[in-house]
């Protein structure tokens, strides 16, 4: 595996200033076409937070590693990119001849749309979005509701109050599908469950997440799950104070708060993103929305801890087979709450 450089946002901002002073959209003619051998293929990725979060941004690192494995190309991974700066940073990478620039999260959609129009010879891919221009702008997402069904199911089974809470960051189609899939799983476990949800409008802020979690616990939430990045420690704090079990996401991160993390939903987009990067390298990536369903050979979809009953874990694995095969159909709903 090739060494990966991680640029700080501060340094990149300086580069952006220099670029904006001396470059324009018509420089796109110098950008690569996205084809060629691994020595010519250059990939960059923008993440909204640090890859040390043991969650969503950490999966960006896993995806970068898998892209390198599949394409032989080095991935330039830039962490903690402010959403407001996204367009300029997309432009910077395109002007430097990167063949594929990946925005890690639907919040990076607008910048990709703008940059793709200015740099037609650069491929842009947005994870957890649904945009496309039939040319050089693509997006991808999983059928996230299929995964999230199990977070809701486990949370509902763990709750002793008949109420489940879900906390998210920003609402866009992918995160709305996350929310609704979780709710459907909770109601499959208990048709009478009360389901509380809250978007804090910030994936990274633990203070906002803690406030939302505390409010839900005050409303009777007996278990909490959600869709956050660096905001998760705030949920841990509220859960510890009130002894409320949690279902976290992406990897087994129970060591972060073993007193309250009862299970983690095992998700990763690395396999899917690397597949699209390889298509870009081969000049075959279509400028459209690419969606990936839960594979039947995914492996356990949740983790088992001392806080999760063995019987519940076994129950979930049986349900997983039914969802993956299509026997249980989970509705896809991209509607943001009013």
Image: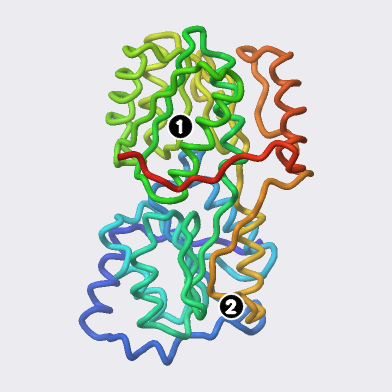
Kindly identify which residue carries mark 2. 41
Residue visible at 56% across and 14% down? 158
Q: Nearer the viewer, residue 277 or 194?
A: 194
Looking at the image, is mark 2 or mark 1 earlier in the sequence?
Answer: 2
Kindly identify which residue carries mark 1. 226
Residue visible at 26% across and 59% down? 84
Q: Quadrant of the N terminus?
A: bottom right
31 in relation to 239, above or below: below
Q: Nearer the viewer, residue 265 or 154?
A: 154
Q: Quadrant of the C terminus?
A: top left
292 in relation to 213, above or below: below
Residue 138 image label: none
To which quarter of the image does residue 79 belong?
A: bottom left
Characterize the local packing of mark 1: few (<14), some (14-19) or many (20 or more) Cα atoms within 10 angstroms. Answer: many
Residue visible at 38% across and 29% down? 197
163 in relation to 300, above or below: above
> Which residue ends up furthest to the left in the rendered image?
21
Residue 116 percent across, percent down from the top left: 41, 77
Give the Cα distance between marks 2 and 1.
Answer: 36 Å
Residue 307 percent across, percent down from the top left: 60, 12
Q: Secondary structure at mark 1?
A: strand
Q: Secondary structure at mark 2?
A: loop
Residue 334 percent across, percent down from the top left: 45, 48
> Which residue ends up furthest to the front in the rendered image?
191
């Amino acid at each position: 595996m090739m060494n990966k450089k991680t640029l700080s946002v501060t340094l990149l901002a300086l580069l952006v200033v220099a670029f904006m002073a001396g470059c324009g959209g018509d420089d796109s003619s110098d950008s690569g076409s996205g084809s060629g051998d691994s020595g010519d293929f250059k990939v960059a990725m923008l993440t909204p937070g640090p890859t040390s979060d043991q969650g969503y941004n950490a999966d960006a690192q896993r995806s970068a590693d898998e892209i390198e494995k599949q394409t032989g190309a080095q991935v330039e991974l830039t962490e903690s990119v402010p959403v407001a700066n996204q367009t300029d940073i997309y432009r910077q990478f395109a002007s430097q001849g990167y063949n594929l620039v990946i925005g890690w999260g639907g919040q990076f959609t607008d910048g990709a749309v703008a940059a793709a129009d200015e740099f037609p010879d650069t491929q842009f891919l947005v994870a957890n979005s649904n945009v496309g221009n039939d040319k050089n702008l693509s997006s991808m997402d999983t059928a996230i509701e299929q995964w999230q069904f199990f977070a809701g199911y486990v949370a509902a089974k763990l709750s002793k109050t008949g109420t489940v809470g879900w906390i998210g960051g920003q609402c866009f189609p992918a995160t709305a599908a996350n929310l609704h899939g979780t709710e459907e799983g909770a109601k499959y476990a208990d048709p009478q469950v009360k389901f509380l949800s809250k978007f804090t409008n910030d994936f990274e802020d633990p203070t906002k997440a803690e406030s939302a979690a505390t409010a839900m616990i005050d409303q009777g939430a007996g278990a909490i799950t959600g869709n956050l990045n660096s905001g998760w420690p705030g949920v841990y704090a509220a859960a510890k104070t009130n002894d409320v079990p949690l279902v976290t996401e992406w990897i087994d991160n129970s060591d972060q708060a073993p007193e309250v993390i009862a299970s983690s939903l095992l998700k990763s987009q690395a396999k899917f993103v690397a597949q699209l990067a390889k298509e870009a390298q081969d000049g075959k990536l279509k400028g459209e929305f690419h969606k990936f369903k839960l594979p039947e050979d995914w492996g356990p979809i949740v983790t088992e801890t001392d806080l999760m009953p063995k019987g519940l874990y076994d129950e979930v694995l049986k349900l997983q087979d039914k969802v993956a095969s299509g026997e249980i159909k989970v509705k896809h709903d991209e509607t943001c709450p009013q």
